[in-house]
Image (cartoon, grey):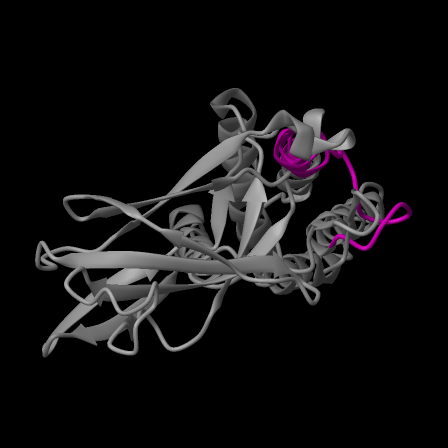
Amino acid sequence: MKKAALWLAAIVITLAAAYFQRGTGPTKPVYAKFTFEGKEYQTSLPRSWETTISPDEMKGDYKLLNKELTQYIFIDSLPDHAEGVFIYKIYPGEWENDTIITFRNGSGFHITMPALPPAAKIEYSFYIKSSADTSAVLPASSVRVGEESVVLRFKGKVPMKALIPHIILMFAAMLLSNFTGLAAYAKSVNINRYALAVIITLGAGGLIFGPFVQNYAFGEFWTGWPFGGDLTDNKTLVAFVVWLAAWMLNTKKNSRRYLYIAAALVMIIIFSIPHSTAGSEYDHSKGEIVTGR
């Protein structure tokens, strides 16, 4: 098989895997439909949002900072008298609900609330009501947006200088992994150098830039084994070790090409696990981040 065909197949597999991962996982916005005054509307409810509290600030009593943050929910074409009501509580645990009447600017509903630390989560529901109905903050005529409550996790701001190299290198590692696995069938292709490229890009993207991204977002460089159970960190480590072992067992004897096929399959399986699954979570009772949730 010609290299061009192998690269084309690798690109298709990589794009399909990236599309699957982007469309799954606990940070993907929830697509929601609802009916208000006889007309159907739709929107997306966020499950990830930047906080105004930095990872350094959360190590003290963050409540003393009196910081706020603003979330946005956009719904097009609602009548002018439609108002938004945001009801949330800290998640997980038995916490009391807080209710916020949103500020509306056109299609945007602005939700201003006390800032929570990176990795903190809330469970919320969003309602639409008519401003003419003043019987209660949340009258019986209110309409819930979506069928279920939504869990949202806050994160710190990640600069592009860390995020972009991380994304590019991880994408390159996946592409090179798929190419090397496919090329292992074609004995005319010397794939050891491509396997080494997988190790370099995966190591740089996942084990160097990845920890920097996580530190900006949640204040920790590494929360996988042996320090924690963060699934994203652990799956990156497993993929790197598998590829390193496959390459080392082929440096002197290039007949174990089947190991590259196995490593490529492991890479696809591992990175099909949705990003941020079983990730960092702020424990309010301990005042610190725990992992594997």
Q: Quadrant of the N terminus?
A: bottom left
Residue 149: give x, y in percent of width and height.
47, 70
Quarter-wise, where is residue 275 in the image?
bottom right
Q: Quadrant of the C terminus?
A: bottom right
Write down the region rendered in magenta.
204-230
Residue drawn at point x = 24 percent, y = 77 percent: 141
Q: Is residue 45 above or below residue 69?
A: below
Residue 241: give x, y in percent of width and height.
81, 48
Residue drawn at point x = 67 percent, y = 43 percent: 195
Q: Nearer the viewer, residue 98 or 72?
A: 98
Residue 285: give x, y in percent of width and height.
81, 52
Q: Nearer the viewer, residue 236 or 191?
A: 236
- 228 drawn magenta: yes
* Left or right of residue 55, residue 116 in this image: left
Residue drawn at point x = 62 percent, y = 43 percent: 190
| Visible residue check, residue 202 | yes
- 89 drawn magenta: no
**Farthest residue toward the front?**
135
| Visible residue check, residue 187 | no
Number of numbered discs visible in the structure rendering: 0
* Left or right of residue 226, residue 20 in this image: left
* Left or right of residue 132, residue 252 in this image: right
Residue 44: give x, y in percent of width and height.
32, 59
